[in-house]
């Protein structure tokens, strides 16, 4: 008997441009991915219940003309289907039923604008943080090292300690609405990923902290741990051959007579999501 794979919805449209890579990452982890334009989702919001994971991929939705993620988030928040159902309500219903949501780069910006991460005090729908323009003042495209917060509630980062992933954004500087909000985010263990050095120590300075994020925050989750937003791109690091130094890694493995895993470190975020949904 063929095992039924859990489904993953990968949103497309309006400038999202990482949907194919993201769908591929979901498939590698075990999901049956489906790419759907946001308008198709709006036609039947009740269909969100078919999925175990919804991913808001990276890109430049609506050209960032009103600010990163602003227009796309507004479309999700205020759109109403022909039968009168609000898309935002359907999305929150999906979360309440135990579904997972992942926002990558522009997707993180959208989730932050929607107010579903970090959702301090479980206050969903109210924006508490933003992803501001990079402190350096220009677009950043580089590989970064990330430490995983041991006490993070996120199911995506479970049992992980450090990751090396690429970033590519012009607006990725994590800023909380106030110092009290930042403190609460830390106290509630909603920080999942931080920019760090080779010793996994928090990196507050450029270039290890590529955008000047407060407390070196690279990713945050909601109180349930089932929603994660992060600026780095795990879908661009699911294979060792996507890494710029893969040939060096291969030679080092050969010299040590050790097998070389072909899985990139970003793969394990998707695999953790799969294992959670499969066991739910």
Image (cartoon, rainbow, N blue to C red):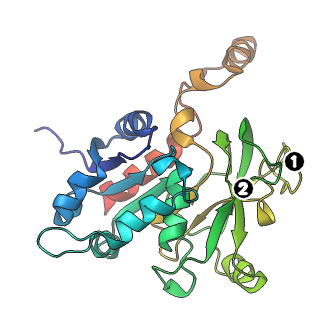
**As drawn, is 187 to the left or to the right of 9?**
right
Q: Is residue 5 above or below residue 264?
A: below
The residue positioned 38% from the left and 50% from the top of the image is 274
> Is residue 237 among what the camera can see?
yes
115 to the left or right of 193: left
Tell me the mark number nearer the camera, choosing from 1 and 2.
2
Task: Evaluate whether residue 158 shows in this view.
Answer: no
Residue farthest to the front, as pictured:
65
- Quarter holding the N terminus is top left
- Relative height, residue 232 to residue 159 (above, below): above
The percent position of residue 78, horizontal first and vertical second, equals 34, 72
- Depth check: give the residue in front, 26 or 91: 91
Q: Earlier in the sequence, mark 1 or mark 2?
A: 2
Q: Residue at x 69, y 18 (%)?
A: 253
Please tell me the numbered disc located at residue 206. 1
Q: Which residue is mark 2?
A: 133
Instruction: Tell me the residue at 47%/65% (across/down).
Output: 227
Vertical order, 180 against 84 (above or below) = below
Number of callouts = 2
- In the image, 213: left or right of 190? right
């Amino acid at each position: 008997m063929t095992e039924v794979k859990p489904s993953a919805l990968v949103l497309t449209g309006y400038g999202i441009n990482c949907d194919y890579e993201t769908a591929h990452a979901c498939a590698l982890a075990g999901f049956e991915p489906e790419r759907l334009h946001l308008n198709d989702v709006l036609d039947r919001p009740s269909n969100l219940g078919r999925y175990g994971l919804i991913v808001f991929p990276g890109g430049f939705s609506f050209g960032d003309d009103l600010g990163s993620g602003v227009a796309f988030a507004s479309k999700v928040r205020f759109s109403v289907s022909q039968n009168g159902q609000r898309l935002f309500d359907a999305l929150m219903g999906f979360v309440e039923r135990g579904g997972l949501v992942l926002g990558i780069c522009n997707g993180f910006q959208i989730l932050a604008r929607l107010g579903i991460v970090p959702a301090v005090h479980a206050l969903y729908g109210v924006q508490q943080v933003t992803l501001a323009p990079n402190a350096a003042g220009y677009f950043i495209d580089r590989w970064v090292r990330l430490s995983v917060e041991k006490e993070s509630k996120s199911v995506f980062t479970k049992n992980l300690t450090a990751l090396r992933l690429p970033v590519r954004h012009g607006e990725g500087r994590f800023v909380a609405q106030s110092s009290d909000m930042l403190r609460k985010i830390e106290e509630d263990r909603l920080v999942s990923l931080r920019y760090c050095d080779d010793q996994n120590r928090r990196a507050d300075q450029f270039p290890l902290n590529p955008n000047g994020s407060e407390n070196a925050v690279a990713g945050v989750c909601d109180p349930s741990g089932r929603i994660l937003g992060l600026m780095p791109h795990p879908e661009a690091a699911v294979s060792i051959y996507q890494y710029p130094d893969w040939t060096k890694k291969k030679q080092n493995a050969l010299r040590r007579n050790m097998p070389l895993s072909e899985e990139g470190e970003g793969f394990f975020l998707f695999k953790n999501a799969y294992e959670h949904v499969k066991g739910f």
